[in-house]
Amino acid sequence: MQVLEFLKELTNPESIIHHGGLVLLLLVIFAENGLVIGFFLPGDSLIFLSGLICGTKPELLGTDITPLTLMMFGAAVLGSLFGYIFGRRVGPPLFERKESIIFKRKYLDITQSFYAKHGGKTLVLGRFLPIIRTFAPIIAGVIRVPVPTFMFFNLIGGALWITSLSLIGFFLGTQFPAIENYVGYIIIGFIGVTTVLLLRTYWKQRREMQADKDANEPPILMP
């Protein structure tokens, strides 16, 4: 039960900030951007909420928006770099790994399909999609994307993801302080939007994967 309670708290952006502060915030961002077990963490809503809190109650994080944004950016970039190195070290055997409650082969398949279509842009576009955000750098390592290319897209993706969400949150927090009373609804909204985007991407990639499979099947010869 204690483990379940811990995981429940770890998926709640408010709990992460209120109980873990800046250190746990950065660790969660790092984990979600490159650790296999980090795909379930609340990256988007957490970054937005950190910016919002920085605009309303900065004492909770003990820092201003500029250093906060830079630290989150660093955590995101380093997390993706860790995932990339992990992918290079493990390589293709990762696809043969036994499935568990945490690890699902389909997470790799959908990310690989997304990568096949978008290439390095996956490290930018995928930053805004749960699961793909976690597995994109790992796949880049598995297929051995050149380090300079990986870092180029890693830096751009990290900058766009962190700055857009944190600065929007900060702006709303400073201009409309009462918005902090609706944090619960905002988080639910984030979860809803990201879930819809993820499901849409998932089914689209599945259809494309099936279409490619059908196209590569040999024709049935009639007797």
Image: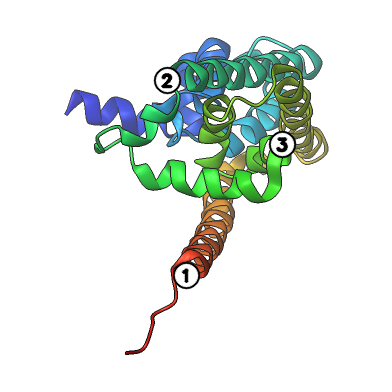
Residue depicted at 57% across the width and 53% down the height: 189
| 4 lies left or right of 60 | left
Q: Quadrant of residue 29?
A: top right
How far across and down, in percent of the image, does residue 107 sit? 43, 44
Say what amino acid the circle numbered 3 marks. Answer: Gly
The tag earlier along the polypeptide, 2 or 3, is 2
In percent of width and height, residue 47 lies at 64, 31
The dot on residue 120 is 3
Q: Residue 214: which numbered mark, if any?
A: 1
Figure check: 217 above or below 107? below
Q: Earlier in the sequence, mark 1 or mark 2?
A: 2
Q: Which residue is under mark 2?
A: 90
Q: Which mark is residue 87?
A: none
In the depicted structure, whether residue 45 falls above or below residue 109? above
Residue at the front extreme?
A: 223
Query: Which quarter of the figure has residue 148?
Result: top right
The quadrant of the rendering that contains the N terminus is top left
Distance (Cα) linking label 3 and label 1 = 26 Å
Applied colour scheme: rainbow
